[in-house]
Each structure stands twice: as structure tokens, then as C-alpha cells.
Image (cartoon, helix red, strand yellow):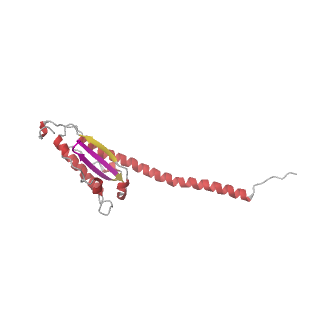
């Protein structure tokens, strides 16, 4: 007479533990996936916002009707400390970085008579921005750096969008500076 072999209680418990470990691992991945999806969405929104802010600046600065005098009058903004201008003495983000970024934008556009304005609030997607403009007068290059985030306190930790604009305008005597030397 042959006996049928059955599973022991130990084997069943071991199988349940292995299966529970797999299920819990999969459940843990959902949280990670959700966080990555949210971060990805914010990264794409920041890139779109950067494009909406930087593109009009580049267009205004690289226009061929900009005079050397106007281009050369662009200063380091918000000031010569660059991103440090967005920090308080204790190292926290200064209040209203978006207002400071808008001011930098308007100052630069005002120097070259670009006639453009800060993008509509719908372009921001609820993000807060920081904008820094640095001018290297020796090489005729203006550097533009932009950051955006939902949480102002994280502004310095966010990726930076960066571009350079070289002078392409007029250097003739019409700009009144003796030929643009």
C-alpha cells in the first residue's frame, strides 16, 4: 500500500512567507513609483517654465538691432553675488524669489528694449522661480541661469537651466559709442 505524500505545515508556512515578502516588495515599489512620477512631472514643468522665461530673454539679447552700448549696460543681476542674492543671512531662501526673478527679467529686457514680459502665470504651473543674469564684458557674453520649484525652500537644490548669449547686434557709430570698442 502506498501512501500519498502531503505538504507539511512547515512547508506551507515557508511558502506563505516567501509569497508575502514578494507582495510587500511590490507594494513598496508603488510608493517609489508615485514619488518618481511626481518628481518627473515637476521636472518637466520646470523645464517648460525655464523655456518660457529664457527664450524671450535670449531673443531680446541676441536681436541684431541691439546696440553694443545697450548690451554692455546689462549688469550682473540680481547683484554680483549671483544665486547668493536669493539667500538670507541664515542661509534660508529670501522671501519672494519669484518677484526678484521677475525684476531681473524686466531689468534685462528694459536695457535692450525687447518689448517682452514675464510669461503668463499659466506657464509657471504653480512653480516659484529664481533667475540670475551674469555679464562678462570682456567676451561680450551674457549668462542666464534659471531654477524653479514648488517649494521655495528647495530652490537651491533644484536643477539649473543655463544658457549663454553672445552679442550679435550693431557696433556701428549709430549707437553713439564710437564704434563699439
Q: Is residue 13 left or right of residue 27?
A: right
Residue at image coords 33%, 51%: 147
In the rendered image, residue 37, in percent from the top left (x then y), is placed at: 46, 50
Residue situated in front as seen by the camera: 55 or 139: 139
Residue at image coords 29%, 49%: 120
| Highlighted magenta segment, given as a residue range | 129-147
Residue situated in front as seen by the camera: 142 or 40: 142
The image shows residue 176, relative to residue 45, as above or below, that is above
Q: Main secondary structure of the magenta part?
A: strand
Residue 140 lies within the magenta run? yes
Residue situated in front as seen by the camera: 49 or 136: 136
Residue at image coords 50%, 53%: 32
- Residue placed farthest to the bottom in the image? 90
- Residue placed farthest to the front in the image? 138
Q: Is residue 79 left or right of residue 158?
A: left
In the rendered image, residue 114, in percent from the top left (x then y), is placed at: 21, 43
The image shows residue 142, relative to residue 6, as above or below, that is above
Residue at image coords 56%, 54%: 27
Determine if residue 10 is in view.
Answer: yes
User: Quarter of the image containing the C terminus?
Assistant: top left
Q: Is residue 38 left or right of residue 61?
A: right
Determine if residue 122 is in view.
Answer: no
Residue 134 lies within the magenta run? yes
The image quarter containing residue 164 is top left
In the rendered image, residue 145, in percent from the top left (x then y), is placed at: 30, 48
In the rendered image, residue 82, in percent from the top left (x then y), is placed at: 28, 53
Amino acid at each position: 500500500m502506498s501512501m500519498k505524500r502531503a505538504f507539511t505545515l512547515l512547508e506551507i508556512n515557508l511558502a506563505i512567507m516567501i509569497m508575502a515578502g514578494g507582495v510587500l516588495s511590490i507594494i513598496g515599489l508603488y510608493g517609489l513609483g508615485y514619488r518618481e512620477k511626481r518628481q518627473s512631472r515637476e521636472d518637466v514643468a520646470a523645464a517648460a517654465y525655464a523655456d518660457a522665461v529664457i527664450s524671450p530673454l535670449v531673443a531680446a539679447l541676441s536681436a541684431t538691432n541691439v546696440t553694443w552700448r545697450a548690451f554692455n549696460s546689462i549688469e550682473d543681476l540680481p547683484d554680483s553675488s549671483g544665486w547668493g542674492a536669493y539667500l538670507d543671512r541664515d542661509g534660508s531662501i529670501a522671501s519672494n524669489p519669484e518677484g526678484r526673478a521677475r525684476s531681473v527679467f524686466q531689468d534685462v529686457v528694459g536695457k535692450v528694449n525687447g518689448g517682452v514680459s514675464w510669461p503668463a502665470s499659466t506657464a509657471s504651473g504653480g512653480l516659484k522661480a529664481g533667475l540670475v543674469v551674469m555679464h562678462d564684458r570682456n567676451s561680450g557674453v551674457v549668462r542666464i541661469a534659471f531654477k524653479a520649484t514648488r517649494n521655495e525652500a528647495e530652490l537651491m537644490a533644484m536643477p539649473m537651466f543655463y544658457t549663454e548669449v553672445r552679442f550679435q547686434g550693431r557696433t556701428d557709430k549709430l549707437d553713439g559709442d564710437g564704434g563699439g570698442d
